[in-house]
Amino acid sequence: MLSLVIFLPLLLTVPIVFLRGRRTVFWYTTAATFVEFLLSLFLLKGFDFHMRGFQWVEHARWLPDLAASYHLGVDGLSLSLILLTTFLTFVATLSSLNYIQKQVKEYYITLLILETGMLGVFAALDLLLFFVFWEVMLLPMYLLIGIWGHERRIYAAFKFVLYTMAGSAFLLTAIIVLRLHTGTFDLVEMMNRSGTLVPAALEGLLFLAFALAFAIKVPLFPFHTWLPDAHVEAPTAGSVILAGVLLKMGVYGFLRFNFTLFPQASHHYAPLFMALGIVGILYGALMSWVQEDLKKLIAYSSVAHLGFVILGIFTFTDWGLQGGILQMVNHGLSTGGLFLAAGLLYERKHTRDMARLRGIGKAMPVFSVLFGIVMLSSVGLPGLNGFVGEFLILLGAYKVSLAWAAFGVLGVILAAVYLLTMFQKVVLTAPTPETRHLKDVSPREFVVFALLLVFIFWIGVYPAPFLRFAKAPSRYLQENVKGAVAAETVPVMPAHQEVQP
Amino acid sequence: MIYFFWLFALLALIGALGVLLETHPVRGALYLLLAFLSIGFLYILAGAPFLGFVQIIVYAGAVVVLFLVAIAVMSLRRIPDDRDLGPRGFLALVFAGAFFLVMLALLRHAPVPAAPTPTPGAPQPLAEALFRQYLIPFEIVSVLLLVAIVGAIVLVRRRPGP
Amino acid sequence: MLWAASLALFAPLLGAILNGVFGHPFREKAHWPAVIAVGISMLASWWILGRVGFEPVVLDLYTWIPVANFVVPFGFYIDSLTAVMMGVVTTVSFLVHVYSIGYMHGDPGYRRYFAYLNLFVFSMLLLVLANNYALLFVGWEAVGLCSYLLIGFWYEKKSASDAGKKAFIVNRIGDAGFLLGIFTLFATFGSVRYDTVFQMVASNPHLYQGALVAATLFLFLGAVGKSAQFPLYVWLPDAMEGPTPVSALIHAATMVTAGVYMVARSHLLYSEVPQVGQLVASVGAFTALFAATMAMVNDDIKRVLAYSTISQLGYMFVAVGLGAYTAGIFHLYTHAFFKGLLFLAAGSVMHATHGELNMQKMGGFFRKMPHTAWTFLIGALALSGLPPLAGFFSKDEIIKHAYVTGHTFIWAVAVLTALLTAFYMFRLIFLVFFGKPRDAEIYAHLHESPPVMTVPLWILAAASVGAGWVGIGEEHSVFHRFLETALGEFHLVEWTVHRPAGVGLIALSVGVALLGILLAYSLYLLRKPDPALLARRAGFLYTLLKRKYYVDEIYNLFVVGTLRVTAKVLFWGVDRALVDGTVNGTGWTLAATGSVFRRWSSGFLRSYLLWILIGANFLVWFLLRSGGGH
Amino acid sequence: MNPTLYLLLSLLLFGLGAAGVVLRRNTLFMLLNLELMMNAVGLALVAASLAGLLEGQLIVLMVLAVAAAEVAIGIGILVSMVRLKDSPLVDLWNREEP
């Protein structure tokens, strides 16, 4: 079943070749991604949220002599991200009707391949398989930015790939070293094995190698400069998926691999990464405050939001972890919305420069309301989705120490500063001749936003069902790290049951 | 006996220097001839009469003659200072000298002892070795020569030039 | 009880959605759903006011955030304090709604205005009804959002949208502190629910001394942001950019009092840590005086009223700081009425002069606008604290409490501020309503506001007079006994000194008020010492006050300026140069080394030969060194 | 007749030949020096045969053949050079800086 969910988009690319006309291809792909979303919802049926191990597991021979197997499985964490991926891909496809004019078929094929790559990353339980999907996902994104991007797209795409490749190099070496020490690529087997997988000195090193690859993806402070360029040049759908899903792979990597396999090192390096998170929050906020380009501003705001997520998960507290995992979904929705808005404006005015987008409040009232709500969810206004995640993260940070929470709270203030400044510059000013007569949101575009708003309000008002996803994984990670630290030598791994569907 | 060696060695050196410094092509070729001849006699002196004669016939006889014919055909004139005494020339001298010294050091380091019984220079054992153990190299060399001949002809053929 | 509370809360929300999302049919008639919604909410609040018993009613609708042991319910906590606050909020809101029908008539954003106003009433009620600090925070920020939307209502005016943004951000700074307060509470008590926290504090008060100090301080930081106390008051004067009914409702009667309500609600926490209470009181006192001084010289009617609000809020914080929670709430209750009245009257003046607010251009409006003038006069008298009216009872009680509990310094500041209050209020009245009209053109067009605006003015005027009688007799008054259940006994905090409060005290405060009026009378009506002359002689002091102590400039320069500069430096320095620099740098160096080698194969034949010779040398040298042995 | 003397001489000749190849601009003299170097090698090999290695002499024959082939090609190149640029100078054939 899981393999079907992952490879369906790939299969659905075939018919595109035979279709004629931009609109037909568009509607076909939208239907395809919608079917994919429904299929992924099917995974929820009979999913036991309290069960510690992986579900919908599929195990098949792949490279026996390397001890690598085609091993897929899903727990609360990966399922929430899979649903986010399929949902955002559907929304992104729906939004790219007249945004893409040239090479339309190739565009939709790339989009679907990208979706397969991403889903694979979240479901893979075999390190080598994970790495394969990790690289597969890279190529379509490169094409998306490189071909359908804007002026400096080659530079941006190239920088994006080089950055990630640098990270993957470390990732691959670490995986191989791990393979040599543990004798297998299989994650579940490693988790079940009691005792530290790797001698203590090496654990720190491996942790850092994995951490570097994922830090680049998140992106954490020093490795973030590829994000603004990639976002500015990427087409709307590319940006939405890049921000909504790709950034979460970094965090997912931390949770799935770093915390599970190297608990002691995770505990040891936690303050460092929390500090990087804080720096990311404040640095991202300051950067976006001085931006003139709308998409670059939103990109830097992603750096700030993910700084929060990193701060949350490294607290190893229930609230921090669950808050962080929920915030990943929230960030996907709110920043995805912001990018959709930016793309919509770009379609109308062919510019991202806020100075020329001034005063659209008068001409596009409906759009202003939608854009306003998405902006407020990004600011973290209580009652909307952003607040719940941020509140829990800061609560977790406070449990570690007041200082962390104090700095984190600064981020809350700065978020209001740069987002409101942007909103005032773009919407809440007197319209200029350029922005006087703009076409307001079309029904299709309204549906795109409506889809996001439904979840933004739902998570804000009644977040319980969404928090359930993160309950079991965060409990496990917490015990894993606490156990490892307490035992210092032999961390007691809780027994793992593997349930055949 | 030993005087002969020094005599011919000296002659060879003069020839080499002549080739090095001489600018007139014909005189240069003649210096070379001198060098070849002296080396030929040195071979004989070293107990390898067959080699000596082959050397004289082939090198002195054929190669130098070929050079002279070439010079005559192309009517090459003397080029006044074709010696490049710029930085590159200087470096060349330096490194040639360095090479000589390095090889000397290598030599001193791994001296070559004189053999108790001098090896027979006569053609008979030489031929035997050539056609028994080293037959394949012999054949390869012959192919090489063939290729060289064809190459030279192709090279010089008058093609309808651009 | 649950039904009444939910009805009161959700009716305005429904009104807001009706107007906001499906408002097209209502276009001109948008005010009807809004007014009806708030009306329902008001009736429900009055019903609750009547029915609230001794024990607080705690009702949970559903669990909002269930994470491990951090379980936050969405529920109500209804006791007499809540009832009073709901009563005040809904009544003033209803009157402002009715008033707005006239005031906002013909404004293109008519529908949007009423939607925001309803949303505000919903948020304020959520804040008052919440039964835990997290939900209180939700209402807290939602109210901030509504004030942002309403201040920047005419967003085409840059100053308005700037003021809205400034309000939201300054509020957010306070809210950040509030958040830390909530975390401290949760860390120490394991829950954010009022009943559990209060019960644990009541059972063993001295156990949590350290944590309580931190929590109360952080919560107070939030209150400073929301109730515009020093140093986070700068947003309130700018908030006057919004429509006047908004200023009346949000920036006089309801939102700004949220801070006072929060302190009153957590009176058990604050009374455990008297030193924090004293800090609260001194901040309140300082702000009161500080704001009053600025109000004295300001020429804009609404700005004067704004500073007066800050000053009166200072009074309320003095009261709750020193443990007199009931007195604080009582002043909040009376202040809501007469300050609302003053703002609405100012609105009516503005309406008549088509937006002109500068007092120097007015004069002699009494004859042309009798209703507005009379109601304004009643409001001013109430605010200055003259006996029969509401202000006297509530403000005097605070002053008496300060004196009785031995805080003579705070008492002196309070009395001085009372003098200044009377002075600037009557300066405003004499400049606007009496004397000769200074601008003929404005004076010609003057007309009295329509009944739909003057009727609410008279209702509020009646309230400003009558509201105070409820509190006659301090401890044994109707108001105090009513709030007893919620705010606990009056003498919770035993202060060291307990001086008898003689009649002299009351005489002093009334005398001070009359003195203020007299001063204003002579200065601005009879022009005995001509104010302009005085201003020139005061020189530096006058300009300091005029320029509002340059506080805004200081903030912009230091806080905003430095942040912007660091941001720019960080962006160009770190982001572009350092990080991008290194990335592109590695690219460049690789290319550079490449070109060096490229030049090496220069195409110069004989240099190749030379390199071969050199290579041979190294080769042999290398053989020599390594080969050596055998 | 000890071989080191021979080796010394061959080294000297080889050095001179190498210097000559690099020093001279005229292709003809480069070829001449080249021939000289080949002979120096031959001499060294003969010295080896003095030291007891019969194959030494044998390889000299091989070297001789190779040298002959090499001269043939060398003269061929020289001829075509002169025909194209009617001057045997090597520097005419340098590739200009791109």
Image (cartoon, helix red, strand yellow):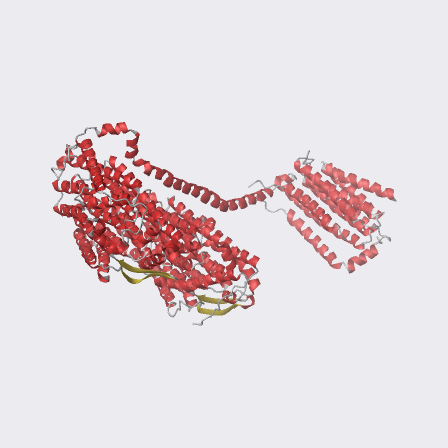
Does any portion of residue A202 appear in the rendered image?
Answer: yes
Query: Where in the figure is residue A198, as x and y percent of width and height?
Result: 56, 61
Farthest-out residue, right: B1
Identify the image quadrant of the N terminus of chain C: bottom left
Of residues D68 and A144, the one drawn nearer to the viewer in this rendering:
A144
Query: Where in the figure is residue A398, as x and y percent of width and height?
Result: 41, 54
| Image label count | 0
Q: Is residue C185 left or right of residue B106?
A: left
Of residues A187 and C227, the one drawn nearer to the viewer in this rendering:
C227
Query: Quick check: A158 above or below A125?
Result: above
Looking at the image, which residue is at 78% across and 59% down? B131
Query: Quick check: C135 above or below C248?
Result: below
Q: Is residue A31 left or right of residue C298?
A: right
Farthest-out residue, bottom: A500
Of residues C81 and D82, the one drawn nearer to the viewer in this rendering:
C81
Does any portion of residue A96 appear in the rendered image?
Answer: no
Q: Is residue B62 left or right of residue A273?
A: right
Query: Where in the figure is residue A167, as x and y percent of width and height?
Result: 50, 54
Query: Where in the figure is residue A340, as x and y percent of width and height?
Result: 34, 53
Of residues D33 and C18, the one drawn nearer to the viewer in this rendering:
C18
Query: Quick check: A343 above or below C377?
Result: below
